[in-house]
């Protein structure tokens, strides 16, 4: 990324396109609609409630981020999306049972106007879901063109000047990148021959990139993290980011693990299990889809703790993750962590974490922030992988052969320093020696 000389103003409506109009998407949409009516606070949204320090501590300059950055405002957002089911956002939100009826009733008319476009859906990538509201086409190349047409039609119909897309759909089965993902030409040839290595989410992403719509991947799917997508994003100057929203248990890991490492406390074991009963839990009950999530979750501690550098402390860490589908819990999932650590002279200790969280409540502010910041990135002339947005993801995308930063505090510093840098402000290192000269 080059430091922008000028950032295009956020004029006109911004289309926010959400593949997957389920619990996360409808919670996001309803929350934004409530917030712009001043009926509720968008708690958890850094762009809406966070501040950013500028200059020295003695300068007392800490504006709200939304006043410092030229972001689109909430009343400029126009929501759309795709889903397997034809339910409006209001109907889908009722089925999801995340938000109480008192909140849904306050924005019922607006939610009812958000109707999903037909989904791209090949069931082999999400085996536990089936729905009637799907596209048909002879090839995956046809599907890309249909999604591209959806985007153009949406922008024209809703009077939007531009759009961003944030994947809010289900976790797809795990598979590594193959030859079809190696180049733009290979991928487009694969689309034409219905290559099995090209999944539903890749079709949406490819269509968005072709339409120059910035794309953020909120699931652990292989979607834009392969050479063909990187090349297309660079060629067409489109920002991409991912992957997998950092919400519940992994959020806790990226807070706790850096603290333990900072104090040079050792770890011998970290066992994590989740119970959840929403659509995501049902999808993850399939072993192939769980594999995608497991890979995303397991990598966090490896990169934070750096066992190759701290063998005595973390070289024998046993890390295990389980996810159990438990329908009575719904969207209110529960994460249990047992942490076996050791301190001075090797004496053992334990930490127990029981996080009773709400998956969509934690994900919604991430969706909002990513939509606004990806749009900002596009207007600032950024393209390709936006590593500065790692703060929001379990498996942050980076340049090839570069390891990701998982430490939430490093990610937060990178995020805010990028904001300062793009606006021409001094970076903050927290050295502070100038106060004592």
Image (cartoon, helix red, strand yellow):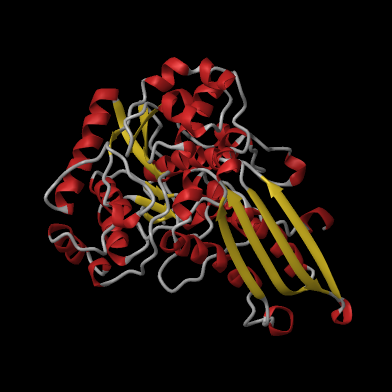
Horizontal side of 409 relative to 119 (left or right) equals: right
Residue at x 37% of width, y 31% of height = 14
Closer to the camera, 315 or 14?
A: 315
Quarter of the image for the C terminus: give it.
Answer: bottom right
Q: Is residue 432 above or below residue 23?
A: below
Residue 62 point in image, percent of width and height: 68, 38
Marker count (numbered): 0
Q: Quadrant of residue 230?
A: bottom left
Could you say which quadrant of the image residue 99 lies in? top right
Q: Is residue 420 visible?
A: yes
* Identity of the residue drawn at 28% across and 46% down: 208
Is 237 situated above or below 228? above
Q: Residue 286's spot in the image, x, y percent?
A: 44, 58
Task: Give the image location of residue 311, x and y in percent.
Answer: 69, 84
Does residue 362 appear in the picture of this structure? no
x and y percentages locating residue 405 in the rendered image: 56, 64
Left or right, 393 with respect to 87, comes to right
Q: Is residue 5 left or right of residue 49?
A: left
Relative to 35, is 47 above or below? below
Q: Residue at x 58, y 33 (%)?
A: 48
Q: Residue at 26%, 60% (x, y): give it.
A: 198
User: Observer-nearest residue: 418 or 223?
Assistant: 223
- Image quadrant holding the N terminus, namely bottom left
């Amino acid at each position: 990324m080059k430091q922008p000389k000028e950032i295009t103003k956020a004029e006109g409506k911004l289309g926010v396109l959400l593949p997957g109009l389920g619990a996360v998407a409808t919670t996001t949409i309803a929350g934004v609609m409530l917030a712009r009516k001043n009926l509720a606070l968008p708690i958890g949204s850094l762009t809406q409630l966070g501040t950013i320090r500028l200059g020295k501590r003695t300068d007392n300059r800490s504006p709200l981020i939304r006043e410092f950055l030229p972001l689109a405002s909430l009343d400029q957002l126009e929501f759309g999306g795709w889903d397997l089911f034809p339910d409006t956002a209001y109907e889908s939100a009722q089925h999801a049972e995340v938000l109480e009826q008192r909140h849904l009733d306050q924005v019922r008319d607006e939610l009812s106007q958000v109707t999903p476009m037909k989904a791209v859906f090949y069931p082999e990538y999400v085996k536990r879901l089936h729905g009637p509201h799907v596209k048909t086409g002879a090839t995956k190349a046809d599907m890309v063109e249909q999604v591209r047409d959806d985007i153009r039609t949406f922008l024209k119909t809703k009077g939007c000047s531009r759009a961003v897309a944030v994947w809010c759909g289900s976790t797809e089965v795990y598979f590594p990148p193959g030859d079809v993902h190696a180049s733009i030409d290979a991928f487009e040839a694969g689309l034409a021959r219905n290559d099995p290595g090209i999944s539903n989410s890749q079709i949406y992403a490819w269509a968005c990139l072709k339409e120059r719509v910035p794309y953020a991947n909120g699931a652990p799917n292989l979607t834009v993290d392969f050479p063909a997508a990187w090349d297309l994003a660079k060629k067409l100057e489109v920002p991409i980011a991912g992957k997998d929203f950092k919400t519940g248990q992994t959020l806790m890991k990226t807070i706790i693990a850096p603290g333990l490492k900072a104090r040079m406390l050792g770890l011998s074991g970290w066992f994590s299990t989740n119970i959840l009963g929403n659509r995501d839990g049902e999808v993850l009950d399939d072993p192939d889809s769980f594999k995608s999530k497991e890979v995303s979750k397991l990598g966090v501690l490896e990169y934070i703790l750096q066992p190759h550098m701290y063998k005595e402390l973390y070289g024998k860490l046993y890390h295990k993750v389980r996810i159990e589908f438990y329908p009575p819990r719904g969207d209110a999932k529960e994460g249990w962590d047992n942490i076996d650590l050791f301190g001075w002279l090797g004496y053992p200790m334990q930490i127990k974490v029981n996080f009773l969280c709400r998956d969509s409540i934690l994900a919604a502010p991430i969706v909002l922030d990513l939509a606004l910041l990806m749009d900002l990135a596009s207007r600032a002339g950024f393209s390709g992988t936006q590593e500065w947005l790692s703060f929001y993801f379990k498996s942050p995308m980076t340049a090839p052969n570069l390891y990701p930063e998982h430490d939430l505090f490093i990610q937060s510093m990178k995020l805010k320093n990028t904001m300062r840098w793009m606006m021409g402000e001094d970076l903050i290192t927290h050295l502070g020696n100038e106060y004592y000269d």
